[in-house]
Image: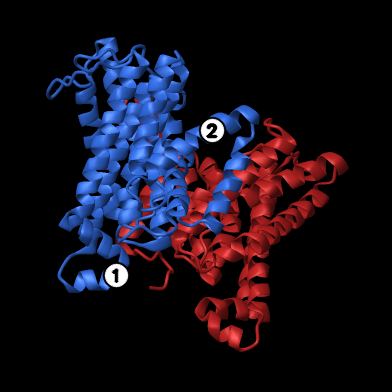
Chain colours: A blue, B red
Amino acid sequence: MNVTALAVLLGVPLWALAADEPFIITLATRAAIFALAGVGLNLALGTGGLVSLGHAAFFGIGGYAMGILASHAQAFAPIMEAPFLIEGTKSMPMIWLVAMLSSALAALAIGALSLRTSGVYFIMITLAFGQMIYYFAISWPAYGGEDGLSIYVRNEFPGLNTLVPMQFFGVCFVILCLALLLMNAIHKSAFGLALSAARQNETRVLSVGMKPYNLRLVAFVISGAVTGLAGALFADLNRFVSPTMLSWQMSGEIIIFIIIGGVGRLFGPVIGAMIFILLEHTLGGLSEFWHVYLGALLLGIVLFAKGGVIGALAGREKAHD
Amino acid sequence: MTILLFIEQMLNGLQFGVMLFLMSAGLTLVFGVMGLINLAHGSLYMVGAFAAAAVAAATGSFVLALMASLAAAALAGALIELTVIRRLYDRDHLDQVLATFALILIFSEGTRWMFGSFPLFLDVPKVLAGPVTLPGGIQYPAYRLSIIVIGLVVAAGMFALINRTRVGIRIRAGEADREMIAALGVDIAKLYTFVFALGAALAGFAGALVGAIQSVQVGMGEPVLILAFVVIVIGGIGSIKGAFVGALLVGFTDTLGRILLPQIFALFLEPSAAVSVGSALASMLIYILMAGVLVFRPRGLYGVA
């Protein structure tokens, strides 16, 4: 089934390319990017059991990393001259690196504080810190404040023309696959097993001499970095970044991708994001108020189908632990 | 800054604080008694405001509007408790977050469907429209002053209800040991519905009161909800006293921060930079306060371990 999901995600834009439907390719790119954000969160939420309601912060920070670097590059104005010169850049790999580093740093700070607590406190605190960064972005006028930041041309990747929809989709798809490979490796590693164990039974993990706090913090930082990378790609897709990317509804939506697919499943976010985009496109075309249906669907999944789509198809609520 | 302006801002902070208390009281009770995190509490705030605006537009009476807000929010609260929330008590927090997030989507878009996207306006009653002169010659809007009074009265009523009445004893017993009070013959399902509806009514009432100062619109509840979370984290989950202290702390910090920080930065920065740095920092101040409390008291000021 996992292979099928990837095949559909790759096949739809290939068909769209043949049928000359660039908009479908853009939708598939959105799905791939949302899936990447979900894959990032899934490490904290699924494997680590950390219900973060503030992951939009990392998504948005990744987006702003792109926006700030690219806007300085297009204005030919250095970001900083003293004590040393920092120039903007239009190079995607460089932007990705900065996006991941800055969102990892933010995740380190937020995680270090929030992980002192657990359960419902953790949910509220991640939500509050996410909101703090949101209000900061709104009230900080240097990079557009509430209006956000536009860039004129999509950033460059060596050897590709990223303005061609199919080529940009390819970039996002490859990154998604790499992230899935990384998560698969983490799951099988000693670290992944320990993280999963800390979710299931904290006392036992403590008693064999490992610190759940450290495990969770590392997972939270990796999770934030991957979601930040997704944010940079999303901003590049739209050539626009605004505080909306940081809003708490965004955090909720990233969780929805995971839930629709199935919590703690490697491919849960991929399937969830594809279904979300499909719903957004079809229901959004039917009614302006499609969020009502989304809400009803989500309520149904939570109350009656706990394992999400993969869980229902596999006939089992939980993945193997 | 003159002392008069300072006192006026203190009153604004107090008014903001008591409104936050009305929001936080229900949330913290619901969490303390039922162990449920309810993201849809902001939607009940919105329901109260819309009910008040609709009734005020139809009848022209502000008192009726306030009563409608209480009734509508309590009714909506009881309804979602009976249909959805009840199934969530023994689920994990992730399920609670998701289901109540789904309720927000349904409430928000449903309200947009019924009332449209344009904000409604709720007028301050004529009697309270002007300013009053306080001792010391301070001019302060009568409506805001009455919000402070109403808020403090409701807070006192809540304390009395929790600490002095039979229902209050049951609520506190429910926080401490729910199996035991069920064994003693208290209908726990009814108690839960009552607590949830009570919290909802307070949220709806706050929505109606604030709706007359700001505009009544879809999405008005969520920013307040997140502030209420900050209040609860600071005060300690489950504690009414913590919610009261936390709400006032957040109210004062936010209001005074927005006024004072730009002025403090103006002492050593040029004016435009001082305003932008000061206001950006002021918008983060309550979250920094929350982080500070967390470092020293991870369970909040009045939380039990």
Amino acid type assigned to the residue bearing label 1 in the image: Asn
Instruction: Label 1: state its secondary structure.
Output: loop
Q: Which residue is mark 1?
A: A201
The answer to whether residue A49 of the structure is visible from this angle is yes
Q: Position of residue A30 (x, y in %)?
A: 41, 29
Left or right, residue A38 beside residue A219:
right
Amino acid type assigned to the residue bearing label 2 in the image: Glu
Q: Return the residue nearer the eye: A262 or B176.
A: A262
Q: Position of residue A199 (x, y in %)?
A: 31, 63
- Of labels 2 and 1, earlier in sequence is 1
Q: Position of residue A134 (x, y in %)?
A: 42, 37
- Name which residue lies at 68% across and 69% down: B194
The answer to whether residue B15 of the structure is visible from this angle is no
Q: Disc 2 sits on a residue from what chain?
A: A
Q: CA distance from mark 2 to mark 1?
A: 38 Å
- Name which residue lies at 36% across and 58% down: B293
Image vertical order of residue A30 relative to residue B69, above or below: above
Task: List the single residue furthest toward the left.
Answer: A84
